[in-house]
Amino acid sequence: GGWWFWDPVENASLMPWLMGTALLHSSIALERRGALISWTILLAILTFSLSLIGTFLVRSGVLTSVHAFAVDPRRGIYILGIIALATGTALGLFAWRAPAMRTGALFQPLSREGGLAVNNLFLMAACATVFLGTFYPVFVEIAGGHSISVGRPYYELTFVPVVVPLLILVSFGPMLNWKRNVAREVLMRLRWPLIVSGLALLLGVLAFGITQILAAAGLALGLLLIAGAIAIPARYWKISSSLGGDLGRFLRATPLAVWGMTAAHAGLGVTAIGVTAVTAWQSNKILEMKVGQSVDLAGAQYTLNSIGDVVGPNYQAEQALFTVTSHAGSRILVSERRLFSASQTTTTQAGIGTGFLGNVYVSIGEQGAGGLVVRIWDHPLVDWIWGGGFLMVLGGALSLSDRRFRVGAARPVARVAAVKASA
């Protein structure tokens, strides 16, 4: 039922994702305007290096993780050597050649290039906080200190304050023109997304109370991202219709990269809403239940129907059937406590009920004096986190399928340069 625990192995995949996202956006400025050349190369080196570091974390066993992986300290030494060789060589070449690189196109701070640069700074800061929290226990132990762990409170105090401003600025970036902009014009392009998110914040405070203002702000932020994403093709449609184009022409003329950006940014908003909901309103109960007994949680009623023994292919299990009744109707959830005779290990299989508005989980424990120990969780909108991730992947696929990025595709700029050279 969880979605993120700030485990070192999870952080090992998050760090290159953050750095790779910065690289992706920086490469847009490089491809379109020839800006941020040295910076983009440095990001490419760091992204690859963090991918290797992730492999080192997972396979070396230097950090304790809840995830089970085959670890070997000797293997970690080899991986560390590969990291030192690859990263050291790349950074050395970069330091040698960077002064000879051209500086790239100039731009005003309030421009698409400036927005992408700010985006990179926030992503770098977020990645740095995760890197420090992940490796701080290693640094302390090397320095002769006690074994420590860095948990969720650290990341809530460091990572979240960096990411929230970044998410606010995400909607503004696509509304910026290249080279220079006027602040008033940018705000006018985003007036409807800002109005929608402002109303959502107001309604959220009225509905949930002032004590839930952070949750209301999280929902409003997610809606700002979604509305800002919709505003991207809407801006293209406004330009197309002003030139007399119809819907068919608009769909044919709009690059796939635009639709990819729309899907990815909207997916980020959907994920933000899911994260906010499950963080603010998740609930759980642990109690002892007897057959026929019911309990209420988060507007749903859970009834223990029966308890029985079942035999599987290589295990014996105690099985409990529950009826979950809510405004969406009734459904049966089955939870088992399995004993594998060969290894004499016991595992619990939770009964999971999925839905558009959230998931519920029911698992059973041992028999207690007052009945069967039952654990119930309610996680609202948790599937929105994965749905938003799917939209982001879809956005990346659409952007990569844009004909302008195909290998060997003709580039208009190159043709113009060739004509000038021949003249």
Image: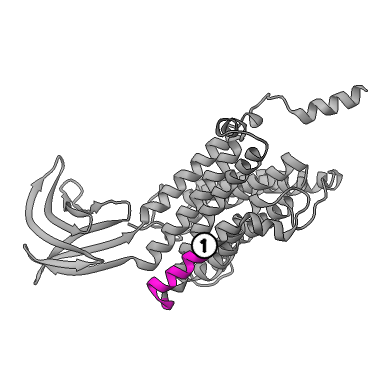
Residue name at image x 49 percent, y 58 percent: 222
- Measured as percent of width and height from the top left, residue 45 is found at 67, 46
Disc 1 is placed on an element classified as helix
Q: Name the residue under label 1.
A: 197
- Measured as percent of width and height from the top left, residue 137 is found at 52, 66
Q: Is residue 191 above or below residue 149?
A: above
- Measured as percent of width and height from the top left, residue 32 is found at 73, 40
Q: Along the line of sight, which residue is nearer the eye, 43 or 58?
A: 43
Q: In this view, does 225 lie to the left or right of 39?
A: left
Q: Which residue lies furthest to the top in this view?
A: 422
Magenta stretch prevailing secondary structure: helix
Q: Which residue lies furthest to the bottom in this view?
A: 211
Residue name at image x 45 percent, y 53 percent: 270
Q: Number of marks in the image?
A: 1
Q: Quadrant of the C terminus?
A: top right
Q: Which amino acid does label 1 sit on?
A: Ser
Other residues around mark 1 within 10 Å, as few (<14) / some (14–19) / many (≥20): many
- Kindly indicate the quadrant of the structure image that contains residue 204: bottom left
Q: Along the line of sight, which residue is nearer the eye, 84 or 166?
A: 166
Q: In this view, does 149 lie above or below 209?
A: above
**What residue range appears in magenta?**
196-211
